[in-house]
Each structure stands twice: as C-alpha cells, then as structure tokens.
Image: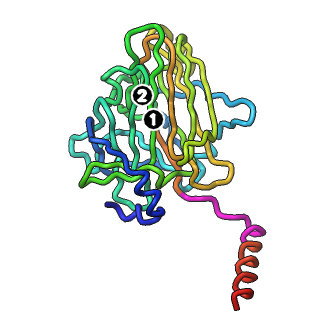
Amino acid sequence: MKSKLLVCMAATCVAGWMSAGVDAAVLTNPVLVAGAGAIDPAGAQTIDTNGSASGSNVLTPQATLEARTDFQAIQQFTDNPTSGSNIAAGTNYLSFSDPTLPDVRLSFSGSYSANSGRDINNLHRVTSGTSALEIVGLNSTANTATLNITFGSYDSTSGAFATGVNSVAAVGFAVANLYLSHSAEVSYFDSLGNLLNIQTARGSNSDLDDGASGNSRGRDVYFGFETPDGQHDIATVAITLSGGVISAGIDDIGFATVAAVPEPATAALLTMGGLVLLARRR
C-alpha cells in the first residue's frame, strides 16, 4: 500500500476500496509535463476551440491551468523509464511512486467498443507527440460512450484501486477528432459523487487550425476546470461522447495537486482563531 493512503480517514479508505482487476495495463510513472504547452504543445494537432459552460458552470482557461506550478499533464501514455508498456484496450491504471501525486484509473461505461482504452498514434486523434487514449463507440447511430478519469490510489500488490482519496484541485485535457455528428459532455464530481461542474462541445468535420476537412478530420477541443475554493475537490471526471460512430482521442490529461494557499488576510484570521482557541483551553 502506498504511503499516500495514510492521509485519509480509515472509514473512507475502507469504503473506497474497489475490486478492480487489471484488464488492460498499469503504467508506472508516466512522464508529466508542466508549464505552457503542457496541453496541446506545438508540433501536433492544434486545439480548434474550447468547451462551453453555461449558467453557474465555468470553463477554466488553458493558460490559467498551465500557469499553476503544480499542474502537470500526461502527453505520452507509456512507462517511465520506457519498458515497452503502454495503455491497452480496457481499464488502465497510471501509478506514481511519488506519494504527493494521485494514481489514476481510466475506465469506460456506456456503449463503447472493446478497443476503447488502447494507445492510438493516428495523428488526427492526438494533440501531443504520437500517443493518445482512444475512445470508440459501437457501430450504431446512437452511441453514448464515457471515459471515467478517477483519482485515487493503486495498490500494486493486490491490484485494488482506492477511491475517495487523493482528489485534485484542477483538471484539463483535450478531446481530439470530435466529428460533426458528435457531442461531448464533461462532468466533474467530488469524492461523494456530487456534481461540481459541466462543460459541453459540438463536433465539426472541419479541423480549423490544421487546415483539413472530411470524415477523418474532426474538431479538437480543450476542457478544463479549477475548483472555485482551490481545494482537492475533483475525484472523477466523466467524458461522455454521443452521436454516430464515435472514434476520438483523449490526450494531454493534466491535473493540479496543491490546494490553494489562503490570502494573507484569511491566513491571519485563521491564526487569530487558533490563538483564541488555545487561550480558551488554558
């Protein structure tokens, strides 16, 4: 068991253990990229547009996430150092030896093809390098396929994945090759299953920034969300694609791990409150 599990309450840990056999791959310490270009670096497919948010929902700008010193993204879905392992069709796990980082489970639900989850190097479905996670719907006209990105802790001995721990403060990523007949809905949940935020996007058969069009040139879309309170609230992100024959790539999955530092005035109030409590105890 990783030491990071010690930060959670015992009851939460017990409730969070899920029986999840590895039916695809476990990647150890995939490379994390920080700074400008963590999502959609130069040299690959270029993001055409951002997701939309309405009402009380928000879309956090890509530049805002990349400006955080704790925001890091996975551009290549391979081990580090490379051992020849990469993601495969089915449920995948990303395991980090650094106890300050969450482990990640990538699983699917809905009407998805058995090919979903594999590493794809089709350049029309990646926004960095030559690697992305593929999500494929069944061959029908009414698909709804969902990729669930869950933050938690992976136990390499038992293969169990603990949920309800190691939530993050921000998440960002790209959906590549979203066709005209497709739509995307991204939902962010906390560890209790409460909905925090929703973003949406419509596809297009015109890849605007890369100057291509046709059946294999869908739109590339950015999605991102930073919790308003700056705390570790995001436990799961559900990326649901709907429409015809879905075939898209999910790339540059990034997250931020450090809770926001209180403003000086807030910190001073907290300190004063602590001193008052201490004085009362005396």
Residue annotated with mark 2: 109
Residue annotated with mark 1: 148
Q: Is residue 262 left or right of residue 90?
A: right
With respect to residue 9, does 84 lie above or below? above
Question: Is residue 262 located in the magenta-colored stretch of the structure?
Answer: yes
**Front-most of 199 and 205?**
199
User: Dot 1 lies on which element?
Assistant: strand
Residue closest to the far bottom: 282
Residue count near mark 2 (Cα–Cα under 10 Å), binned few <14, some 14–19, many ≥20 = few
Q: Which residues are magenta?
A: 258-267
- Residue 233 location in percent, x, y? 58, 50
Question: Is residue 70 located in the magenta-colored stretch of the structure?
Answer: no
Residue depicted at x 47% and y 14%: 217
**Front-most of 175 and 42?**
175
Q: CA distance from mark 1 to mark 2?
A: 8 Å
Residue depicted at x 53% and y 11%: 181
Residue count near mark 1 (Cα–Cα under 10 Å), binned few <14, some 14–19, many ≥20 = many
Residue depicted at x 51% and y 18%: 242
| Among numbered discs 1 and 2, the one appearing first in the sequence | 2
Tag 1–tag 2 contact (CB < 8 Å):
yes
Q: Is residue 223 left or right of residue 6?
A: right
Instruction: Give the quarter of the image for residue 48.
Output: top right
- Residue 53 location in percent, x, y? 68, 31
- Residue 91 location in percent, x, y? 33, 35
